[in-house]
Image (spheres, helix red, strand yellow):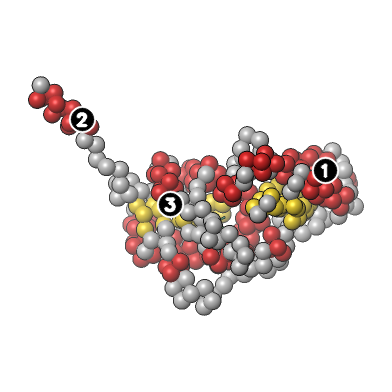
Amino acid sequence: MNQARDFYRFSITIPPITDEVDMRTYSNNAQLQSALDSFRSKGQSIAFVPTMGNLHEGHLNLVRKAASLCDVVVVSIFVNPLQFGPNEDLDAYPRTLAADKEKLFSEGVQVLYTPEVSDIYPQGMAQQTQVSVPDLSDTLCGSSRPGHFDGVTTVVAKLFNIVRPDTAVFGEKDFQQLSIVRKMVRDLCMPVKIVGVATTRDEDGLAKSSRNGYLSPEQRHIAPIIHQTLNSCREAIACGFDNFLQLESHARMQLLQAGLEPDYFAIRDASTLRAVTPETEEIAILAAARLGPTRLIDNVRLTLNPVSDWGMLAGSH
Ligand code: PAF
């Protein structure tokens, strides 16, 4: 009897799951760097996924991609105040560290980096040297969120210098951000490979985003119209409709009629994010719209066939 009870007691005594066992969490830069040096000294490659937390399936797909590319995955969670405008949702931005840790642990992430604002901006944000990518940062989201992309590139450059990853993984949902980070890395000769991952969507097409959590049930019902409108526009272009101004204004009207407040709906060259030209090889169709106080963004892309689509789009704008 006693033996049976002892056996039972023994069999349920499993070691507690702690960060120390499998996923190490650091907020201190020096400790993080010494842990990463020890991986590097064993010849292990490092993939990095920078995030602002409130992790969803979209982030976890970035983590899975990172794990498929390198030996060690490092994820950062840092809600970067430098990329939020004065009237934006910095304070309301969801902070869900305990749940995020569990998700990352389940994905087998080895290192989590959770710096404080004072670790990233020890002299304060006003004194911070900034990295600014010209041109690409001024259009689309950059027009309605002045300074936003300078905040993104500054923090990403700092994170790259702290983590020194071989590869960094970003979502294509933030297509403009991905383009800007690629240009920053190219222009500043940063030794990191940037990998983009396709947007993860709910079944009705809504792109996964931490900000979807702000939507009321009614707004959540309306939100997929952004993706539907982007898709209709892509189909029209693929079918040869080449009056882009008309397509853009028709799409904006559709968003308005659905109860969204479009910020922009734009058909652009995917590599310059400027107007489509005869040299354009890939088109990006990008939209940002407000639904109540929530600003949602999404995009789809269309690769042009140089032979058959060329003439069709040569005169378009
Ligand atoms: O895409 C994000 O979550 C953020 O812009 C990033 C890249 C983590 C920088 O703060």
Label ID, residue 74: none
| Left or right: where 141 falls relative to 89 | right
Q: Residue at x 86, y 52 (%)?
A: 245
Upstream in sequence: badge 1 or badge 2: 2
Identified by mark 3, the residue type is Leu
Towards the viewer: 80 or 24:
80
Disc number lying in front (1 or 2):
2
Quadrant holding the N terminus: top left
| Left or right: where 34 falls relative to 293 | left
Please give the residue where the numbered disc 3 appears in the rendered image: 97
Q: Residue at x 42, y 62 (%)?
A: 115
Give the CA distance from mark 1 to mark 2.
Answer: 63 Å
Please give the residue where the numbered disc 2 appears in the rendered image: 11
Identified by mark 1, the residue type is Ile
Q: Residues within 10 Å of mark 1 (few under 14, many from 20)?
A: many
- Confirm whether residue 186 shows in the render: no
Q: Is mark 2 within 8 Å of ligand 1?
A: no
Please give the residue where the numbered disc 1 appears in the rendered image: 237
Q: Residue at x 59, y 44 (%)?
A: 208
Give the CA distance from mark 2 to mark 3.
Answer: 31 Å
Identified by mark 2, the residue type is Ser
Q: Residues within 10 Å of mark 2 (few under 14, many from 20)?
A: few
Upstream in sequence: badge 3 or badge 1: 3
